[in-house]
Image (tube, rainbow, N blue to C red):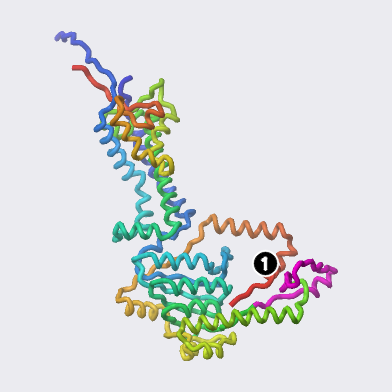
Amino acid sequence: MGQPPFRWGYAIFVLLMLGLLGFITVGVLSLFAGVDVESLGGNVALIPIEGIIAGTDDSGFFETTTNSLDTVELIEKAGKNPGIKAIILEINSPGGSAVASEEIANAVRKTNKTTVAWVREIGTSGAYWIASSADHVVANRVSITGSIGVIASYLEFPGLLERYNVTYQRMVSGKYKDLGSPYREMTQEEKAIFQQSLDDIRDYFVSEVAKNRNLNKKDVDKIANGLFYLGAEAKELGLVDELGGKDEAVRYIEKKEGIKADIVEYKKEKTLLEVLSKVLGRQSFFVGKGIGSSLFDRKIASGIGINT
Amino acid sequence: MPRLNLPKEKTFTGPALIWKRIAAFFIDMIIVNIVVLFPFRALFRNIIPKDYSFSEAYKLLGSSSNYASYISSVSFAMSILVILYFFMMERKMSQTIGKMMMKIYVVSDNKELKAWQLLARSLVFLPVFPFVLLWAVDPLFMFFTKTNQRLTEILGKTRVVEMYTLQ
């Protein structure tokens, strides 16, 4: 068999087609891979903490929450990146789960980078817990911060059930197994148990803030009544180090690290697949459970959640 | 003017010389890198900043499982495109651009080249276990077989040949 003829036209067609396929593949990979490739340069990592702080991802198309696992991963990623010299936590959150807040606060404390908490509109409760764990806290004069306390309020609707002739059949093995069930009234004893737990969590919260801010625990205890403070008040109380915004946060870092700050946002972008599967999952939940269950908030229906 | 009735040149096909095969491979890789894999450069540039040393880049890539899985996805997509290049060229013309320039081509031990035979030749490009083992083993076979065949060529019953002329 002789040497086959070579067709340049076909060769060029193959190359052009594969080149085009390459561009499409890169586009698809960027869409579905879920790695924020833009966030890897620079020397200061900006990590946003927005919305309710939770231990799982409850964000949808139109709502933002901070998932502690993702945030901890970003902090650790920035910590391991030799090019990153400091981390700015851009806080705009009313708080959330006590556990999730502590997870993030611990990650901030553990990192070997300089950390600055920049409180924007709001940085209260669990969000302040996180802010207090940073080396430096910057807040606007009218930012809302503080609100150190714990909440576990919930709706009780045995009256509603009674009105519709629905009864709660209590079947438990263990006296306190359905403690906090919204389908029956809580006894005084149960309330006392709950209150004790909340007081313990608050006490731990106060200790952590005092330790993080190097303040006297008794002093923090006095202001830990759930009241929020404006940035200026918080500065006077010692809950905030400096009044200002991003510029002040950057200036602190530049002075401390002796660098010219080049900020990059570290943000875990959700892939299209993740968003779609979440939306579809929620729809399935509502369809499956029926309209009745969708009237109640998922968290209320499943029991009490403790939030800071 | 009458011409002499000279005897026709005697030709036969034999195994392509190894240096020609290596040269053809490098030419193909350069072409694929320039045309087909060009869009992937931007991805890698974003993952590893330009001024990073090797150790810094290594540390960065090891810092998260996300990077590892992302690099794996990108590598896999790139290898598929490379396989497609060799498959489409050799299926239609028994040659790639590199092979054409080196005047060598692919033949089947049977009658004609089949799709599975061409895919078998390209298994070496897959960046997944156990095919990664072929990266070292596959080309080594070329040096130890009389027909200069790679391991995947032996498995796929294909050979790369060139035309020799008897003077």
The secondary structure that dominates the magenta segment is loop
> Horizontal placement of A281 versus A119: left or right?
right
Q: How many marks?
A: 1
Q: Is residue A123 visible?
A: yes
Kindly indicate the quadrant of the structure image that contains residue B50.
bottom left
Helix, strand or loop status at disc 1 = helix
Circle 1: residue type: Arg
Q: Is residue B8 above or below residue B51?
A: above
Whole-percent x, y for residue B98 in the image: 29, 35
Mark 1 is surrounded, within 10 Å at the Cα level, by few (under 14), some (14 to 19) or many (20 or more) other residues, namely few
Q: Is residue A222 above or below residue A202?
A: below
Q: Quadrant of the C terminus of chain A?
A: bottom right
- Check residue B88 for magenta coloring: no
Residue at the (53%, 75%) spot, across then down? A93
Residue at the (31%, 21%) spot, across then down? A2
Q: Is residue A17 visible?
A: no
Residue at the (41%, 44%) spot, across then down? B127
Q: Is residue B44 above or below residue B83?
A: below
**Which residue is farthest left?**
B1
> Horizontal placement of A158 versus B73: left or right?
right
Q: Quadrant of the N terminus of chain A?
A: top left
Q: Which residues are magenta?
A: A152-181
Residue at the (50%, 65%) spot, across then down? A70
- Check residue A159 for magenta coloring: yes
Residue to which mark 1 is pinned: A298
Whole-percent x, y for residue A199 in the image: 62, 82
